[in-house]
Image (tube, coloured by chain):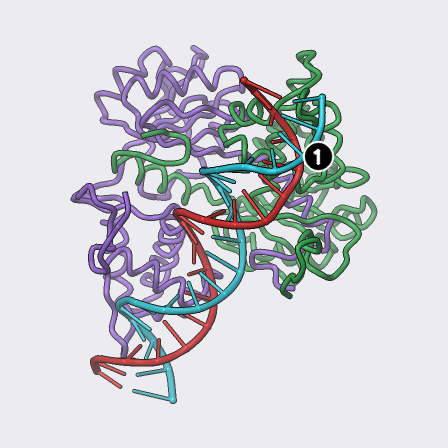
Chain colours: A green, B purple, C red, D cyan
Amino acid sequence: MKVITVDALEWPDDAEPMPSAPEKTLERLSLYRRLLVTIVSDGRRHVHSHDLASLSGFTAAQVRRDLMVVGYTGNPARGYSAEGLVEAIGTFLDGPEPEAAALVGVGNLGRAILAYFLGRRPGARLVAAFDIDPAKVGRVIQGCRCYSIEEVERRVHDHGIRVGLIAVPANAAAGVADRLARAGVRGLLNFAPVPLRAPAGVYLEQMDMTTWLEKVACFARNEAIGKDGNQ
Amino acid sequence: MKVITVDALEWPDDAEPMPSAPEKTLERLSLYRRLLVTIVSDGRRHVHSHDLASLSGFTAAQVRRDLMVVGYTGNPARGYSAEGLVEAIGTFLDGPEPEAAALVGVGNLGRAILAYFLGRRPGARLVAAFDIDPAKVGRVIQGCRCYSIEEVERRVHDHGIRVGLIAVPANAAAGVADRLARAGVRGLLNFAPVPLRAPAGVYLEQMDMTTWLEKVACFARNEAIGKDGNQ
DNA sequence: GCCTGTGAAGCTATTCACAGCT
DNA sequence: AGCTGTGAATAGCTTCACAGGC
């Protein structure tokens, strides 16, 4: 539905209590937060939009726009409180508490993913991993307990998992996506090299490395310009 | 620079012999190609835009627009020749021959990346891997020979490598990006969990898993709608 | 003076809709 | 009847530019 008056401009009608924003904005917010965390741990108390801009590679205007959607308001003299912003972005992105997530497929890629998130504490915690290989079941791999895929429904329910990462071979991916969706997962990150059709009501993000590689190769070939790479 | 007449609309002025297109289009083309390859190997000779649409999850109009930029023209009765399209997209994306690419960092993630591309033949071939760990140097890992990072300049030059994949720890990433750029690489795919500033003239793609996870988590929390996930 | 917050303008991307072909 | 190719319309995103505050 269209928005009519200037002041109702904020969210499209259906009066959700909690926020939502353009995908791109969400992505940038996620990055700002991480930059801010390091700023805070460096002992700085305040940041200006152009600080975040130069750290992130976006423009200052863009940064301010993005911060508008989280509703955190700075101060012309001092800028934004770094800590305050981290918290504001946190409640915006994560809500009251970070989501629980599960990884399916503990092969090469799966282990790399676990290692990647080990020690980081993003807006989601990897609380369980699943695999069919009995040799992996029961072990703790990169700090994450591995269960049999057969337990997926029960554990998704018990842990309140709403996010699933798929890192299984191509031919198994669609089945896993379905099974996760049926178990109650609402968001999927697919690392398998096949395009998945998102089950109804679940948000699907495709991690398509082949596409990215080909895109970069294409730009590399044609006098690369774009994104940050100026000129 | 602006484009003036209707018929000059094709490419912005500076008369490059070879193509260029919006990033998003490139991404979709890459996917179409892979879908087409499986269509061809299933023995089908022709496809319609809506076939590609339903396989890829985009709209038929979108597919046709994208194919416009590669300049391949179909036929109202039969649609597009599947083989012809694969080839047309191939020459558009890859040019005369696929780019040579190098991976830096053969840890968990690096190995997973090698495994991922092993056997696939996308628009770039992984022809060399580099690491500082002497234990890895000289070995062949997932079908790819591993060299000392010290050889990077020489090998990049010798193999004509123009694409680099960075899979080193966060603190080493910026240095590696610089070194690759200085050695002549024109496109970078960064898997390290830090935002890199692209060296002048090189195209940089950030593989930011944390961002993606947080985005998916955010949508999962908020009655997920978006992308494909209908309703 | 330099910063934030934000309407308004400018771009880019997607979708519509239809002429032309078979 | 159903498809492609494509101008025109729409929607979405980013940048500009400036009012208002310290």
Q: Quadrant of residue B76?
A: bottom left
Q: Is residue B108 above or below residue A130?
A: above
* Element on which disc 1 rests: helix
Identify the residue under disc 1: A89
**Where residue A159 appears, x then y in whole percent?**
81, 44
Q: Is residue A136 above or below residue A187?
A: above
Report the chain holding disc 1. Answer: A
Q: Is residue B215 left or right of residue B68?
A: right
**Where residue B227 appears, x then y in whole percent?**
56, 56
Q: Is residue B77 left or right of residue B227?
A: left
In the rendered structure, which amino acid carries the disc numbered 1?
Ile
Query: Depth check: B93 or B65 in front?
Result: B65
Q: Is residue A158 left or right of residue B12?
A: right
In this orientation, does residue B87 appear? no
Q: Is residue B14 left or right of residue A96?
A: left
**Total numbered badges shown on the rendered structure:** 1
**Where residue A135 appears, x then y in whole percent?**
65, 37
**Where residue A88 appears, x then y in whole percent?**
74, 33
Query: Depth check: A103 or A19 in front?
Result: A19
In this orientation, does residue A69 appear? yes
Label 1: few (<14), some (14–19) or many (≥20) C-alpha neighbours in 10 Å: many
Q: Residue at x 29, y 64 (%)?
A: B82
Q: Is residue A117 above or below residue B38?
A: above
Q: Is residue A45 above or below residue A201?
A: above
Q: Quadrant of residue B147?
A: top left
Query: Depth check: C12 or B73 in front?
Result: C12
Q: Residue at x 76, y 37 (%)?
A: A91
Q: Residue at x 46, y 29 (%)?
A: B190
- The C terminus of chain B lies in quadrant: bottom right
Q: Residue at x 20, y 41 (%)?
A: B14
- The N terminus of chain B lies in quadrant: top left
Query: Depth check: A116 or B216 in front?
Result: B216
